[in-house]
């Protein structure tokens, strides 16, 4: 069984990154969440070999995209407003935070204009906090069984993204991640015909990623443990 502790913060980004990477199995993708950190900090992580970064504001992401090396894979992880889609669609690698059919439909239009297919994750809302965006399991099932999404040819739904409740209760966090993995398996079979590239389960942040990996996450989004507190 997978078990690893969260490394303590070191002096610099490179050693934090190395320490975090040592705790992450090869099959798990590491998204270094660089939101609120300057271009220099991202460049430091880039120079240490990191290529996938996560941002939560469209304009920040665009500015950083323009300033930094073009082989970076940018993941968008924040709430995306329709009028900001155009700032990320031309180059974004994965939009992890699709929280409504309406947004998916707007991404479709923008991706079509840009003549590309936008990879997306559906964001689930399982955490207890009121403020978090995302589909409940039932809203997600409803959206998928409705079928309208299947007409969208410029978006490709690659999996699910979630955040666990912000609590010290490990059992609760673990049970949330566990039910999300079951849900992932359910909808992959039922609505995606088990297609191979429905294969990303993005779960786990600095304080809970070992639990998430233990429960089947294959994509962790880690900010503070790499960059320190913004
Ligand atoms: C900020 C953020 C993270 C990273 O959180 P840390 O606690 O700094 O690791 C991960 N996912 C989302 C959606 C975020 O907004």
Image (cartoon, rainbow, N blue to C red):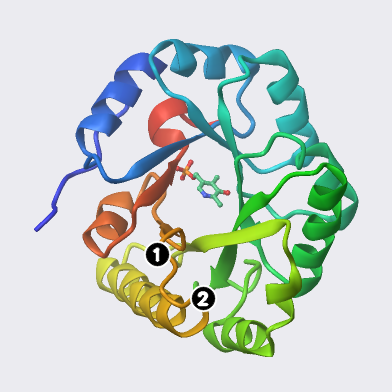
Q: Which residue is mark 1?
A: 167
Residue located farthest toward the right when viewing the structure as drawn? 83
The residue nearer to you, when weighing 99 against 166, is: 99
The residue nearer to you, when weighing 55 against 128, is: 55
In the structure shown, which secondary structural element does the residue marked by tag 1 occupy? loop
Quadrant (top left/top right/bottom left/bottom right) for the C terminus: top right
Residue neighbourhood size for the residue with mark 2, other residues' Cα within 10 Å, grouped as few (<14), some (14–19), many (≥20): few
Residue located farthest toward the left when viewing the structure as drawn? 1
Residue drawn 65% across the image and 67% down it: 133
Q: Earlier in the sequence, mark 2 or mark 1?
A: 2
The image quarter in which residue 103 lies: bottom right
Q: Using the numbered discs, state the Cα–Cα distance from disc 2 to disc 1 in whole angstroms.
A: 10 Å
Left or right position of 139 against 178: right
Residue 95 sits above or below residue 70 on the image = below
The residue nearer to you, when weighing 175 against 64, is: 64
Label 1 lies in ligand 1 vicinity (Cβ under 8 Å): no
Residue 64 sits above or below residue 100 on the image = above
Q: Which residue is mark 2?
A: 128
Does residue 12 show up?
A: no
Does residue 5 show up?
A: yes
Left or right position of 177 against 215: right
Q: Position of residue 20 (x, y in %)?
A: 29, 32
Residue 145 sits above or below residue 54 on the image = below
Q: Position of residue 140 (x, y in %)?
A: 59, 81
Quadrant (top left/top right/bottom left/bottom right) for the N terminus: bottom left
In the structure shown, which secondary structural element does the residue marked by tag 2 occupy? loop
Left or right position of 159 against 168: right
Residue drawn 45% across the image and 35% down it: 224
Left or right position of 112 against 159: right
């Amino acid at each position: 069984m997978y078990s690893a502790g969260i490394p303590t913060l070191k002096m610099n980004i490179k050693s934090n990154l190395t320490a975090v990477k040592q705790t992450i199995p090869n099959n798990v993708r590491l998204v270094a969440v660089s939101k609120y950190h300057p271009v220099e900090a991202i460049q430091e992580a880039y120079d240490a070999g990191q290529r996938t970064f996560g941002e939560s504001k469209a304009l920040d992401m665009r500015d950083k995209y323009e300033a930094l090396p073009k082989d970076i894979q940018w993941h968008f992880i924040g709430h995306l407003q329709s009028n900001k889609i155009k700032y990320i669609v031309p180059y974004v690698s994965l939009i992890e935070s699709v929280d409504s059919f309406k947004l998916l439909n707007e991404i479709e239009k923008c991706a079509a204009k840009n003549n590309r297919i936008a990879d997306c994750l559906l964001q689930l809302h399982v955490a207890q906090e009121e403020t978090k965006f995302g589909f409940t399991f039932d809203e997600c099932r409803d959206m998928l069984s409705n079928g309208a999404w299947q007409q969208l040819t410029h978006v490709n739904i690659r999996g699910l993204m979630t955040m666990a409740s912000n609590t010290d209760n490990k059992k609760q966090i673990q049970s949330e991640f566990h039910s999300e993995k079951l849900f992932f398996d359910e909808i992959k079979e039922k609505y995606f015909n088990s297609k191979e590239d429905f294969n990303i389960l993005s779960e786990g942040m600095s304080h809970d990623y070992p639990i998430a990996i233990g429960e089947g996450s294959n994509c962790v989004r880690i900010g503070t443990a790499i960059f320190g507190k913004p």
